[in-house]
Amino acid sequence: MATGNSRTDGGDYRLPHGGTLTPTNKQAAGASRRHSGVEEDAQTGVDHQGLVRGHQRSLDNGCRRRPPSIPYQEKARAPGQTDAQPAMKEDKMKKPDPEFAALQFTEKNPDEMIALSESFYRNVQRRRSVRDFSDRPVPEEVIKNALLAAGTAPSRANMQPWHFVVVGNPDTKRAIREAAEEEERAFYQGGAPEEWLNAVQPLGTDANKPFLETAPSLIVVFLKKVTLDKGGKGHKNYYTTESVGIAVGILITALHLSGLATLTHTPSPMRFLNRILGRPDSERPFLILVTGYPGTNATVPAISRYELDQIASFF
């Protein structure tokens, strides 16, 4: 589609009313006339000198617009494109369609759902944080399967901002214990708020952490602030605390349901874990999850948990 004047193959210009402006018919029609010092085309009334002067002013002002007197052929529009929507280059702007797969979901009848949910609750209700561990080794496959379960946790854009380091080597466990107890002593002897010390006093905790050596496995959880792609480029992760927290919850539950005891330990600060375990600065230690069989004479504080109406509301 052509708008305004359009040029023909011979260098002539086609006028809006259908005629063709050439040097020959321009001269035959009177060529041009002078009117107040302005030259106008006798047939079209186009002020050629004014257009040239206007274009020169645009160039002087730094503009780079098309000269108004030079006609142009309008480019083809993409389907649905308007004047306010320039065509986009498909090779740069078009994103690949996401891939989807059928959801693997099996619906259960209400009675079965209630029975399963109650059974799960009764089982997980017995989970307790244990500080007395046996040194008996645990099946490696149990740890691996629990980690795979933790890896199914939801995360923003499926970035999976976690890394799990399983520590079973006695020397490495000893190094972790020594560094953790050093930080704990500084915390208990001056860094801990009085309110915090009063809160944990009934639980019998202190700066000594023998379970870090006794338990057969320590799972050190790191939070990844960035994820590297195959080319080595880093991409920032979002909602990392929420994502890693959910993954740890699944990990604790998986280990419990598999028959192991657990304890979450969070020495402060924890940067010594990066040094001992060789993890990059882009990863932040989240916690140490101690796991194994409970000791023969293990005890736990006699505590109670809130009732449903104390932890939930329904609208």
Image (cartoon, rainbow, N blue to C red):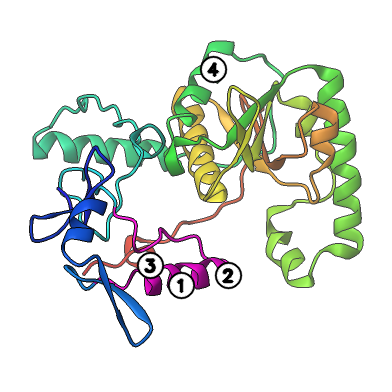
Tell whether position 63 is magenta: yes
Q: Is residue 22 visible?
A: no
Who is closer to the viewer here, 222 or 248? 222
Label whose residue precedes the other's in the sequence (4 or 1): 1
Indicate the amino acid at tag 3. Gln
Q: Which residue is mark 3?
A: 310
What are the residue bounds of the magenta stretch? 46-71
Q: Which residue is mark 4?
A: 144
Q: Which residue is mark 1?
A: 53
Q: Quadrant of residue 172?
A: top right
Q: CA distance from mark 3 to mark 1?
A: 81 Å
Q: CA distance from mark 4 to mark 3?
A: 36 Å
Give the number of the mark in front: 3 or 1: 1
* Quadrant of the rendering where the C terminus is positioned: bottom left
Q: Name the residue located 42 percent from the left edge and 43 percent from the top edge.
A: 125
Q: How many marks?
A: 4
Residue 60's mark?
A: 2
Relative placement, left or right, of 120 versus 108 is right
Q: CA distance from mark 3 to mark 2?
A: 76 Å
Q: CA distance from mark 4 to mark 1?
A: 79 Å
Q: Name the residue located 29 percent from the left edge and 27 percent from the top edge.
A: 99
Label whose residue precedes the other's in the sequence (3 or 2): 2
Indicate the amino acid at tag 1. Arg
